[in-house]
Image (cartoon, rainbow, N blue to C red):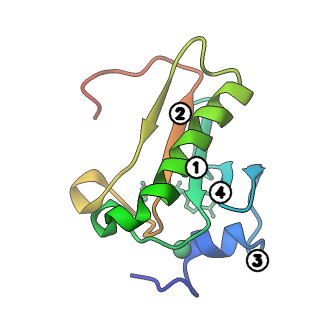
Amino acid sequence: MAGADRCLFCRIASGEIPAKKVYEDKDVFAFHDINPQAPTHVLVIPRRHIPSLDDLSLSDAATVGTTLVKVAQIARDLHLNSDGYRVVANHGDAAGQTVFHIHFHLLGGRNFGWPPG
Ligand code: AMP
Ligand code: ZN
């Protein structure tokens, strides 16, 4: 697992590695997924390095809560809210997590099946 210094998403949020930015503020960074799974596929991350959901404790509640509120704000800004959208957070191998910096996938622009694959 990458430490914060080598973490891909930390390096994207700092501007060290380029990405198609959607939104940023002092706490949160959002950018288009490089391998989109829907017409709109944005990754929304806290700037603070937290590897995964399994690492969360109550002291992270403000960080994660702020990030999720920004997901909803970005969904409104991209006009995904009227038709609907999906938010996904993968943890671990069974869910297919590949980047160990906590992130929310914001997916929109098509219909989504349930249960998910
Ligand atoms: P997960 O599988 O939930 O860990 O999601 C990681 C996501 O990061 C995948 O959807 C990848 O397509 C995406 N991804 C990996 N590298 C980059 C990158 N350099 N820029 C944008 N998205 C990326
Ligand atoms: Zn990181």
In the visual, does 22 lie left or right of 64?
right
Residue assigned mark 3: 16
Residue under the point 63% across and 22% down: 80
Residue under the point 30% across and 58% down: 91
Q: Earlier in the sequence, mark 3 or mark 4?
A: 3
Q: Amino acid at mark 4?
A: Val
Residue assigned mark 4: 28
Residue assigned mark 1: 43
Q: Earlier in the sequence, mark 1 or mark 4?
A: 4
Callout 2 secondary element = strand
Distance CA(mark 4)–CA(mark 2): 18 Å
State whether label 1 is within 8 Å of ligand 1: yes
Distance CA(mark 1)–CA(mark 2): 9 Å
Residue under the point 48% across and 86% down: 3
Nearest to the eye among marks 4 and 2: give it: 4
Distance CA(mark 3)–CA(mark 1): 17 Å
Callout 4 secondary element = strand
Q: Earlier in the sequence, mark 4 or mark 2?
A: 4
Q: The N terminus appears in which quarter of the rendering? A: bottom left
Q: Which disc is residue 107 wearing?
A: 2
Distance CA(mark 3)–CA(mark 4): 16 Å
State whether label 2 is within 8 Å of ligand 1: no
Distance CA(mark 1)–CA(mark 4): 11 Å
Q: Position of residue 86 (x, y in %)?
A: 46, 29
Nearest to the eye among marks 3 and 4: give it: 4
Q: Give ligand 2's quarter of the image.
A: bottom right
Q: Which disc is residue 73 wearing?
A: none
